[in-house]
Amino acid sequence: MDWRIFFTAFGTIFLAELADKTEIAVLSLTAKTKSPWSIFLGAMLAFGIATLLAVLLGNVVAKFVPENVLRMVSAGIFILIGLLTLWGKF
């Protein structure tokens, strides 16, 4: 295992998910249902499956699309989402 990539992925996802709408939804659901372990396990399973799908799709896409194109498209999508969020349309 490449530990540098592991910790980069962990740090990036951990910081990106803090105070994210998913975390707030989990917090609300836990407060409402008073079932923290059920919520934790359900959320972890959902996030794990979503991450698995992203990794599998990324692996396939990386075989056909050059890295620099992926980087530019990803950056463009993030900028577009940021602008739409600022304008209140997303």
Image (cartoon, rainbow, N blue to C red):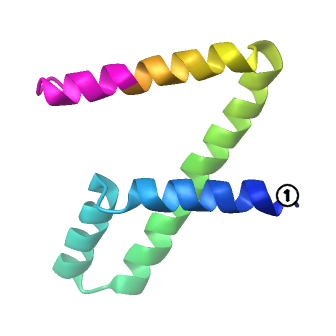
**Does the image show residue 70?**
yes
Please tell me in which quadrant of the rendered image residue 59 appears.
top right
- Is residue 85 located in the magenta-colored stretch of the structure? yes
**Outermost residue to the right:** 1
- Residue 39 left/right relative to 73: left
Looking at the rendered structure, the kind of residue marked 1 is Asp
Magenta segment boundaries in residue numbering? 79-90
Please tell me in which quadrant of the rendered image residue 63 appears.
top right
- Residue 75 left/right relative to 87: right
Indicate the position of residue 19 as horizontal and vertical percent values: 29, 61
| Residue shown at 11% from the left, 27% from the top | 88
**Dot 1 surroundings within 10 Å: few (below 14), some, or many (20 or more)?**
few
Q: Quadrant of the C terminus?
A: top left
Indicate the position of residue 78 as horizontal and vertical percent values: 40, 27
Please tell me in which quadrant of the rendered image residue 30 appears.
bottom left
| Residue shown at 69% from the left, 32% from the top | 58
Q: Quadrant of the N terminus?
A: bottom right
Element marked by disc 1: loop
| Residue shown at 76% from the left, 14% from the top | 66
Write down the residue under mark 1. 2
